[in-house]
Amino acid sequence: MDNRERAKQHYVRALEASDPFCYEAFEALIGNHMLTAREERDLFDNLDLGRDAQHGWWLKALYECKGKKYGKVEEVQGKLGALEGEEFGLSSSLDVLTCKAEFLYHCCEYRRCYEVTQRVLQEDPHHLDVLPCHLACAVELGRKNDLFLLGHQLVEEHPARAVSWFAVGCYYLCISQHDSAERYFQKATGLEKDFAPAWMGYGHAFAYQDESDQAMAAYRTAARLFIGLHLPLLCLGIEYMRTNSLPLAEEFFTKARAISPEDPFVLNELGVLAFQRKQYSLAVKQFKKALSLIPDPYSNTTWEPTVNNLAHALRKTSRFQDAIEMYTRALALTPKQANTYSAMAFTYQLMGQPHRAIELYHKSLGIEDDAFTSDMLFLCLKEVSNPSVLML
C-alpha cells in the first residue's frame, strides 16, 4: 500500500502507548526519516520509559542522539558524553559510537568522524549501520583507495544489500566518474527503495553533470519516500536556483526549513536566494543566523563559503569594515583564494583606500588571472596617479 503517513502514525502509537522499548518501531521512524524535527521532539517528550529513571534516561538519551541534531549540538554533545562516561559506561558500545560518528558528520568534523567509523568497523566489520556515515565521510575526505577496497569487499560479502552498491557509487563519485556513480546508485535504489543515501547520491551524480531534470526527479522521489528528510527539498531548491527559477527555489527552501528549521545549510541557501534578489539586508540576516547555529564556524573550512557570502552581503549594504572582517576570516579558513582577495580589494576600493586595494588586487592576480580584477587594478592605479578620477 505504501501509505507512509498511516505507517508513521502506527509506529508512533506503538512507542507512545504500547512499548517505548520497541526499537523496531523507533528504527522504522528514524531510519526511514518519517518525522519532522517538531514531531521528533513531541515523540521524545511523550515516551514513558518507566520508573527506573537511570535506565530510562540512557535509553531516551540514545534515542535523542539518533534523531535530528540541528540546533541541538551542545545538547547532543552532552548526552553522548554522559553515555560514554563512568555512570553508564557505554564508550565501547557500537551503537553509541555510531551515534557519535553521525554527530561528528553533522558537525562537518569529517576527519574525527572517519576515525570513529573506522574504529567501529575494526570492532565489527559487519556493523552495516555505520557504513552510510563512513562512506559519506570517505567521499568528503577524498579517500578513493579506501572506497575502492571497501566497495569490492561489500559487493562480495553482501551483494543483495543496497549499501554495498552505494559504496561502489561513492567510489566513482569520489573519482568524478559520475556516469558510473549514477548507475551504481540506481542499482542500490532498486535493491532497497527505502535506502535514503542511495537516492541522494543518485541525484548528486546527475547534478554534478548539470543534468538538472534527472537530478530533480531523483530528489523528488526521495522527498516523497522520506517525508521527514529535508535534504531532497533543499537540493531541489538548489537545482531551481541554478536554473534561475527563484520562486520555485524559495518554495522548496521553505519546505526544507519547515522540516528542519535550524539547519545552517538551508539558511545559507535562503541567504543566497535573498542576495540574488538584491535583498541584501535579508541575506545578511540569513547568513548570520546560519553561522550562529554552528559551534565554531571560523575554524571549519566547510563554512568558508557562508562566511564569504556574509562578507559579500555586508559589502552590498555598505558595511565595509564588517565585510573586511569576514573576508579576513574566510581567508584564514581557506588561504590563497583569488576571488576573496579580489572582493576584499574591491571593498577597500569602495572605502577610498586605493593603495590597500592595489596590494590585494596584485595578490589575487598572483594566484589566478581574472578580467574583473585586472580592470579594477587598472582603475586603482589610475586613481593613485590622478586622484581626481571618479571611482565606480
Image (spheres, rainbow, N blue to C red):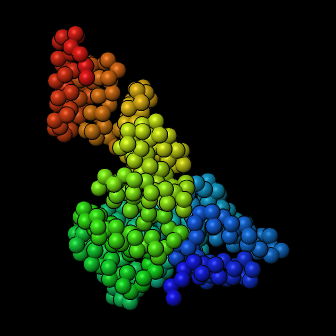
For the residue pair 172 and 372, the one nearer the viewer reads as 372
For the residue pair 247 and 142, the one nearer the viewer reads as 247
Pinpoint residue 96: horizontal percent, then vertical percent.
59, 70
Please give the name of the residue rendered at 39% of the width and 55% of the height, measured from the top-left corner: 249
Please give the name of the residue rendered at 73% of the width and 82% of the height, measured from the top-left corner: 19
For the residue pair 62 and 313, the one nearer the viewer reads as 313
Q: Quadrant of residue 186?
A: bottom left
Please give the name of the residue rendered at 46% of the width and 36% of the height, measured from the top-left corner: 281
Q: Quadrant of residue 18?
A: bottom right
Relative placement, left or right, of 7 versus 304 is right
Residue 296 can be seen, yes or no:
no
Q: Residue furthest right?
A: 51
Relative placement, left or right, of 370 versus 155 is left
Pinpoint residue 76: horizontal percent, then vertical percent.
62, 60
Relative placement, left or right, of 87 versus 266 is right
Q: Is residue 91 above or below residue 285?
A: below
Pinpoint residue 35: horizontal percent, then vertical percent.
58, 70
Q: Is residue 19 above or below residue 65?
A: below
Relative placement, left or right, of 202 versus 74 is left
Please give the name of the residue rendered at 32% of the width and 31% of the height, measured from the top-left corner: 344
Pinpoint residue 299: horizontal percent, then vertical percent.
45, 45
